[in-house]
Image: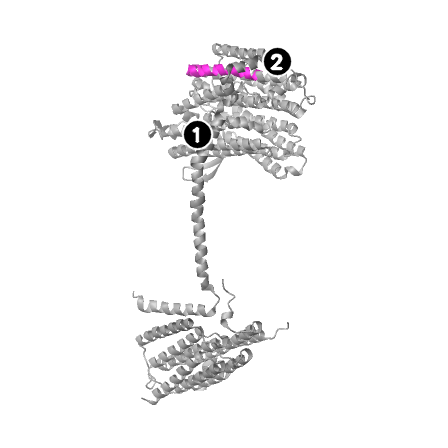
């Protein structure tokens, strides 16, 4: 039995760094804060790797499965005898995997930010908030019970809000941070309802109990029907609503493109690799219960599938490189949700689960790499827009090479990482539902297309007149790029099926070439199409756009979903709900309070005459009172 | 009507009449004089009750000390030739109602209580007994109150002197 | 009964004097006249104690001693009150109780 209680330090170190840099960072030179933050995350990274090594390779398996054990647990709030909220560290294949992902990407982003944010005035603030985020995300993935996960969920939302609104002097950044927080908060309402219903019917918050073999979730809450679905199904749907908000699934996706207002390292860390996968992680964590409630799982699959298609279509039309990457993230997370949605449980049946987690792992690497590379490009060119770039491959060699690797990975070309994970997802989808498979197959091709559209527009095409020659990023920025590129190349060879599976029992995977070959083919078609259209500057894209007319315009405007939301909130909710409520609050609630105060004032004004300071009045009152009481008690009170 | 009753009625008439005059008189010096008469009649009442020592103390302290003190203060603070103002009617009525109500309530209660009245013990109270009681510490000894009263009088003396001192500013 | 005078006569007498004193306290404006009314009240109580002593408990002397102490306390209280009145007169050349209403709302 190995003692894993040191894992609490994985959470505490970023927290301590946050407090220390937050309070004292501005007093020192910026580089000191940067080094402190990066070192802290470096230590966390080493601890995570050590934990993973110990967990996967040293700890004995029980019944052929990896153990799910509590590294550290402490009862924080005891509500009743059985219902209590703990704070602790749960070690389980997916949480250990997520520890590696988060600590690696966060470490790389910290290192990158030393270079990227060098001239910013809020340098210390940035690093302390990055540490806060790391702490929150790490706490979320190792949560031992669903309430702890909710607490850290909200913390992650707060960190995201702070970081998106980092450039707080810009109105667009402030608006974007508010939008992100409000949309995810609204989704978290669903999450909370789900938690409450779940814990009420099962009587516990604890994950080990809820997802263990004899979970009360399988027995309780099954009978009561509401609109044709049992209570447990409803609670799982609500919980998924929370996950959908955080993972930017349709229709709660509107915040993710706007979140690109934050600095690029933030986009890399939060909105690509870690926070947005929290929803996927949540479904994976609760997977035994989801598997039991198939209707909820179907909803997960279809929402994921639709989102990936929707986002891919929009990504083909966007010109801001960060927005293309944001929609790409949305699409890839749709893949992950879909993979979970079509998965079964146990051994080969759980292929979707394994594939989803595998894709999460590899996606973190290449998406973070893409964002950091975009950051290097923006740093060199001082613009976000594709049409202001071109021919950068001469000026930014390292960025170019790593970006290309990432694009190949995301397109699903072997031997890069994306191929393996995406392939497993396609296999799982094929065996489950042919329609979903067809959607995902199409999206795979579109992914390759729009990524290479982005690649060619930036690095090839006609050279723009730049204000000053773009120069390659400094070493602190290129080293993370290289490290992540190595990850993107080789991560695919990790034998994931032996490590992370739905029931923690390893199994052997084999490549189904029947699916793999067509997927490579469609990726190559996508790349080929992009090469033809964008490698050299041609007229074909504009002509296609005009030819597609309304469809292009709709896709370019993100299918007007933002406008729909604005309409609903401004015209309907503000006018018909908020205004009467505000009137009620101002006139009736405040009116009551004001009325009470007014009555008190008037009454005290009238009564203050009693304290007139006139001695004889006091004496009169005293004597008459005494006589009155004497009368009362001697004559009138007959017991 | 026995002699005692007659003397009692005489004294009580004097007391009541003069006390009424004290509280209603418009000239302040006259009020002080009427108070003096009330106090002297009270000491007469004590003589009637065969408490000679107490009557002497009443005359000395109350009539001789306190009334003189009051007259001194009148001379120091008021214009003794001015007539005091008549209080407003409402105030007089309220106070009168309260006083009359008080008298009624208390009298009714008193008259309804049955007292065990003992006959008079003709032995005189002499100063020797009083002196011994005042300084003894036994069951009916009053040495503790005696000491406390001494301290009280000391404190009152010091207090009045300090309060009434002319300030140097 | 003290040689023909029942106790009730004494008690009614003292009640009347007491409430005359109360009336005087409530009605008079001059501080010194208020003080005189208080002396009336104290005096009535003295007579009360003495009457109880003589008629209800003739063997003891408690009432008399109590009365002596009341007289002593009355003297002390009158002297301190006069000192305060003199002080007030020095400050505001006036000893009208209605003018002393600073401890009000």
Quadrant including the C terminus of chain A: bottom left
Q: Which secondary structure dominates the residues rendered in magenta?
A: helix
Q: Which secondary structure lies at badge 1?
A: helix
Residue farthest along the bottom direction in this orientation = B3
Q: Mark 2–mark 1 contact, CB under 8 Å?
A: no
Q: Residues within 10 Å of mark 2 (few under 14, many from 20)?
A: some
- Residue A32, given in percent of the width and then of the height, sits at 66, 34
- Residue A489, given in percent of the width and then of the height, sits at 58, 17
Residue A574 lies left or right of residue A410; in this view the side is: left
Residue for point 63% across, 35% down: A124
Question: What is the quadrant of residue A15 in the picture?
Answer: top right
- Residue A206, given in percent of the width and then of the height, sits at 44, 33
- Residue C43, given in percent of the width and then of the height, sits at 43, 79
Quick check: is A441 in the magenta stretch?
Answer: yes
Q: Nearer the viewer, residue C28 or B67?
A: C28
Q: Is residue A145 visible?
A: no
Residue farthest along the right direction in this orientation = A468
Q: Which mark is residue C105?
A: none
Q: Is residue C22 visible?
A: yes
Residue named by callout 1: A239
Residue for point 39% across, 23% down: A294
Query: Disc 2 versus disc 1: distance between alpha carbons?
Result: 47 Å
Residue for point 52% across, 10% down: A521
Residue A78 lies left or right of residue B169; in this view the side is: left
**Placement of B63 over or under A93, stated as above or below:** below
The chain holding disc 1 is A
Q: Which secondary structure lies at badge 2?
A: loop
Residue named by callout 2: A537
Magenta highlight range: A429-452
Q: Residues within 10 Å of mark 1 (few under 14, many from 20)?
A: many
């Amino acid at each position: 039995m190995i003692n894993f209680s040191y894992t609490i330090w994985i959470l505490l170190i970023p927290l301590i760094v946050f407090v220390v840099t937050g309070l004292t960072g501005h007093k020192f030179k910026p580089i000191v804060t940067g080094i402190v933050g990066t070192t802290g995350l470096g230590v966390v990274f080493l601890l995570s790797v050590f934990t993973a090594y110990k967990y996967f390779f040293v700890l004995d398996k029980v019944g052929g499965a990896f153990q799910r054990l509590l590294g550290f647990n402490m009862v924080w709030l005891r509500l009743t005898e059985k219902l209590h909220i703990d704070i602790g560290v749960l070690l389980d294949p997916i949480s250990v995997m997520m520890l590696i992902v988060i600590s690696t990407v966060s470490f790389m982003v910290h290192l990158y930010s030393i270079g990227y944010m060098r001239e910013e005035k809020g340098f210390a603030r940035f690093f302390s908030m990055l540490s806060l985020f790391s702490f929150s995300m790490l706490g979320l993935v190792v949560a031992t019970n669903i309430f702890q996960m909710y607490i850290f969920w909200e913390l992650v939302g707060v960190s995201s809000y702070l970081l998106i609104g980092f450039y707080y002097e810009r109105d667009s950044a402030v608006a974007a941070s508010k939008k992100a927080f409000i949309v995810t908060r609204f989704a978290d309402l669903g999450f909370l309802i789900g938690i409450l219903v779940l814990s009420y019917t099962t009587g516990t918050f604890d994950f080990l109990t809820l997802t263990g073999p004899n979970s009360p979730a399988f027995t309780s809450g099954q009978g009561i029907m509401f609109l044709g679905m049992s209570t447990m199904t409803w609670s799982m749907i609500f919980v998924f609503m929370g996950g959908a908000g955080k993972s930017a699934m349709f229709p709660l996706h509107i915040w993710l493109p706007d979140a690109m207002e934050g600095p690029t390292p933030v986009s890399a860390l939060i909105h690509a690799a870690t926070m947005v996968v929290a929803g996927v992680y949540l479904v994976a964590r609760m997977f035994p219960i989801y598997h039991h409630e198939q209707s909820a799982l179907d909803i997960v699959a279809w929402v994921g599938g639709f989102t990936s298609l929707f986002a891919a279509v929009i990504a083909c039309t966007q010109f801001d490189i960060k927005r293309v990457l944001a929609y790409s993230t949305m699409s890839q997370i749709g893949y992950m949700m879909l993979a979970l949605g079509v998965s079964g449980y146990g051994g080969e049946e759980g292929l979707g689960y394994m594939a989803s987690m595998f894709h999460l792992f590899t996606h973190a690497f290449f998406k973070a790499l893409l964002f950091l590379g975009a950051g290097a490009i923006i740093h060199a060119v001082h613009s976000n827009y594709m049409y202001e770039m071109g021919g950068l491959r001469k000026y930014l060699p390292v960025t170019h090479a790593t970006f290309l690797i990432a694009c190949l990975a995301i397109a699903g070309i072997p031997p890069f990482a994306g191929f393996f994970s995406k392939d497993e997802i396609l296999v799982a989808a094929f065996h489950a539902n042919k329609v979903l498979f067809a959607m995902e197959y199409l999206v795979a091709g579109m992914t390759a297309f729009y990524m290479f559209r982005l690649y060619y527009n930036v690095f090839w095409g006609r050279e723009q007149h730049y204000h000053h020659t773009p120069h390659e990023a400094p070493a602190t920025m290129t080293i993370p790029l290289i490290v992540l590129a190595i990850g993107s190349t080789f991560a695919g060879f990790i034998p994931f099926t032996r490590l992370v599976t739905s029931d923690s029992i390893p199994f052997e995977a084999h490549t189904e070439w029947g699916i793999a070959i067509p997927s490579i083919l469609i990726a190559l078609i996508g790349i080929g199409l992009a090469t033809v259209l964008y490698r050299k500057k041609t007229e074909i894209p504009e002509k296609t756009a005009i030819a597609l007319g309304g469809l292009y315009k709709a896709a370019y405007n993100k299918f007007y979903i933002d406008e729909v939301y604005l309409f609903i909130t401004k015209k309907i909710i503000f006018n018909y709900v908020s205004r009467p409520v505000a009137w009620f609050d101002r006139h009736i609630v405040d009116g009551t309070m004001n009325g009470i105060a007014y009555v008190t004032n008037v009454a005290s004004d009238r009564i203050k005459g009693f304290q007139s300071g006139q001695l004889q009045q006091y004496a009169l009152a005293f004597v008459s009172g005494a006589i009155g009481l004497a009368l009362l008690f001697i004559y009138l009170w007959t017991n | 009507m026995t002699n005692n009753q007659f003397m009692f009625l005489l004294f009580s008439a004097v007391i009541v009449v003069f006390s009424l005059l004290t509280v209603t008189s418009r000239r302040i010096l006259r009020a002080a004089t009427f108070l003096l008469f009330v106090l002297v009649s009270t000491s007469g009442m004590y003589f009637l009750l065969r408490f000679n020592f107490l009557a002497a103390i009443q005359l000395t302290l109350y009539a001789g000390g306190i009334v003189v003190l009051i007259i001194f203060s009148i001379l120091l603070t008021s214009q003794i030739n001015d007539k005091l103002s008549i209080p407003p009617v409402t105030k007089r009525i309220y106070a009168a109602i309260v006083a009359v109500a008080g008298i009624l309530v208390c009298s009714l209660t008193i008259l309804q209580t049955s007292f065990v009245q003992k006959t008079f013990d003709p032995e005189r109270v002499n100063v020797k007994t009083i002196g011994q009681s005042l300084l003894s510490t036994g069951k009916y000894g009053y040495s503790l109150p005696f000491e406390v009263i001494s301290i009280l009088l000391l404190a009152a003396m010091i207090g009045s002197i300090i309060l009434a001192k002319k300030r140097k500013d | 009964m003290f040689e023909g005078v029942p106790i009730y006569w004494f008690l009614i007498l003292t009640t009347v004097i007491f409430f005359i004193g109360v009336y005087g306290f409530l009605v008079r404006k001059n501080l010194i006249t208020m003080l005189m009314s208080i002396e009336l009240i104290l005096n009535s109580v003295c007579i009360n104690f003495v009457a109880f002593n003589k008629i209800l408990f003739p063997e003891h002397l408690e009432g008399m001693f109590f009365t002596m102490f009341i007289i002593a306390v009355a003297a002390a209280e009158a002297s301190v009150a006069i000192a305060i009145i003199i002080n007030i007169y020095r400050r505001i050349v006036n000893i009208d109780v209605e003018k002393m209403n600073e401890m009000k709302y």
